[in-house]
Image (cartoon, grey):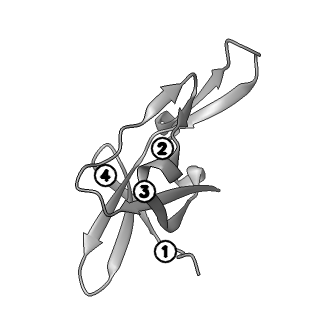
């Protein structure tokens, strides 16, 4: 089980992210971001081609990259759908910080 974290900001423009090697890196505190919610994603529900096994060229450690999108439906309540290449894979319930 993986967790996707959605962040919110009061700024008019989305922050830019820097990638360093195989991971996404950013200083969230400097960008005025705060955690909005967490979405659990079960990689077993994704098609096999959404998951790729990789090996770090620096230290040889094996890791996996997982490709999917999160669609947000605005209605009487927010609903979150897990998507892969435009197809809905499933829906998830968000947990919000207290």
Disc number for residue 32 = 3
- Marks 3 and 1 sit apart, C-alpha to C-alpha, by 25 Å
Question: To which residue does mark 4 refer?
Answer: 87
SS class, disc 3: loop
- Marks 2 and 4 sit apart, C-alpha to C-alpha, by 11 Å
Disc number for residue 93 = 1
Mark nearer the N terminus (2 vs 4): 2
Mark nearer the N terminus (2 vs 3): 3
Mark 3 is surrounded, within 10 Å at the Cα level, by few (under 14), some (14 to 19) or many (20 or more) other residues, namely few
Question: To which residue does mark 2 refer?
Answer: 47
SS class, disc 2: loop
At horizontal 42% and vertical 36% (from top left) the residue drawn is 17
- Marks 1 and 4 sit apart, C-alpha to C-alpha, by 18 Å
Question: Do residues under tags 2 and 4 come within 8 Å of each other at their CB atoms?
Answer: no
Question: Do residues under tags 2 and 3 come within 8 Å of each other at their CB atoms?
Answer: no
Disc number for residue 51 = none
Question: Do residues under tags 1 and 4 come within 8 Å of each other at their CB atoms?
Answer: no
The quarter of the displayed image where residue 33 is located: bottom left
Of the two numbered discs 3 and 1 in the rendering, the one whose residue sits closer to the viewer: 3
Mark nearer the N terminus (2 vs 1): 2
- Marks 2 and 1 sit apart, C-alpha to C-alpha, by 20 Å
Q: Is residue 71 above or below residue 76?
A: above
Instruction: Residue at the far top: name it.
Output: 57
SS class, disc 1: loop
- Marks 2 and 3 sit apart, C-alpha to C-alpha, by 35 Å
Give the position of the C terminus as an image quadrant: bottom right
């Amino acid at each position: 089980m993986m967790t996707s974290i959605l962040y919110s900001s009061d700024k008019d423009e989305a922050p830019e992210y820097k990638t360093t090697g195989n991971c996404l890196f950013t200083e969230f505190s400097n960008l005025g971001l705060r955690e909005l919610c967490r979405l659990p994603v079960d990689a077993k529900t994704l098609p096999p081609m959404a998951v790729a096994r990789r090996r770090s060229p620096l230290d040889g450690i094996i890791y996996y990259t997982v490709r999917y999108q999160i669609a947000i439906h605005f209605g009487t309540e927010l609903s979150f759908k897990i998507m892969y290449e435009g197809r809905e894979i499933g829906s998830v319930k968000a947990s919000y910080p207290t």
